[in-house]
Amino acid sequence: NQQDRVGRTPLHVAVSSGAPELVQPLLSAKASTEVQEDDGATPLRLAVSQGDLALTSMLLGVGADKNALGADAVPLIVLATEASVHVALALVKAGADLNQPDATGRTALEVAISRKEYELSELLLAKGARPTSRKDPHGNTSLHVAVAHQAEGLVRLLVRHRAELSEQNRQGQTPLIMAAESGQVGVVELLLHSGAHLHLCDASNRSALELALSAGHLNVLKVLLQQSMVDVNGMSKRG
């Protein structure tokens, strides 16, 4: 476990080389998995950042801390979601804290949604990840992001797990407004059926109904007009 001038142990060096044949003897000799380099990285953090599933699995198998934070305060599960879906899946199955946020408040689920990773998002939610109402710099929640990606499967996952339906971003758009404007009829039907507010307007006082009409999305318009609470005479606050 002797450290060099930047805090690396032989295990750090072996993991950095990506060589399981070097790592295994060190683990068998009880090399510590928890020593940190000067930048706060443990051997597991190095393996995760490299997207190395084999080394990640080896280190998790001997009990390496799956929730250790580095100097950047980014949880391993968030780092893994950015680096490799397979590594992230391994951490999920090993019992990592799925709701641990980074310094900006991002969780692994938010990263998975932003990267359109359906399988990982589904597993995260099944294992206890919670949709948050945290907003990115544009004011978008994960549900906004899923709608913007036109990823109906991700939208359905988030709605099923009780994501907030009617948050507004910095432009005043709700997920329903975004879906109506982009012609996503299936998403519009889902959001309305799940209780999304129909008559909220964006920052330009445009409703989902007006935006669907302006964009010529007749299938969306038909769905909106079928709602019992629709007010066709209050299409927008601008009249």
Image: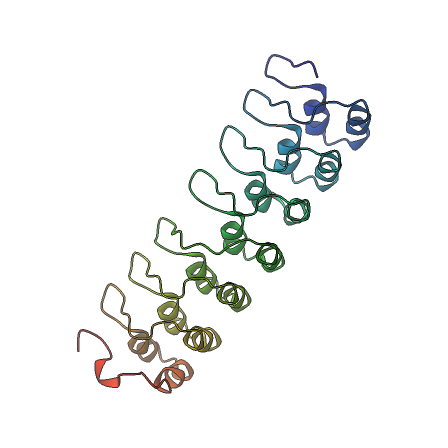
x then y, percent, for residue 127:
61, 54
Left or right: residue 237 versus residue 55 is left
* Left/right of residue 213 with respect to residue 92 in the rendered view: left
- Residue drawn at x 36%, y 80% is 216
Give the quadrant of the C terminus: bottom left
Q: Residue at x 73, y 25 (%)?
A: 14
- Which one is nearer the viewer's eye here, 16 or 23? 23
Instruction: Identify which residue is drawn at 49% across, 31% down.
Output: 72
- Residue 116: image location, x then y, percent: 54, 57
Q: Give the total of numbered labels.
A: 0
**Which residue lies at the image location 75% right of the left edge and 40% below the top edge?**
54
The residue nearer to you, when weighing 32 against 82, is: 32
The answer to whether residue 93 is above or below residue 116 is: above
Q: Whole-percent x and y of residue 139?
A: 34, 54
Q: Nearer the viewer, residue 25 or 49?
A: 25
Q: How is the image coloured?
A: rainbow
- Report which quarter residue 189 is drawn in: bottom left
Q: Position of residue 206 (x, y in %)?
A: 26, 71
**Where, by quadrant of the figure, is residue 48 drawn?**
top right
Quadrant containing the N terminus in the rendered view: top right
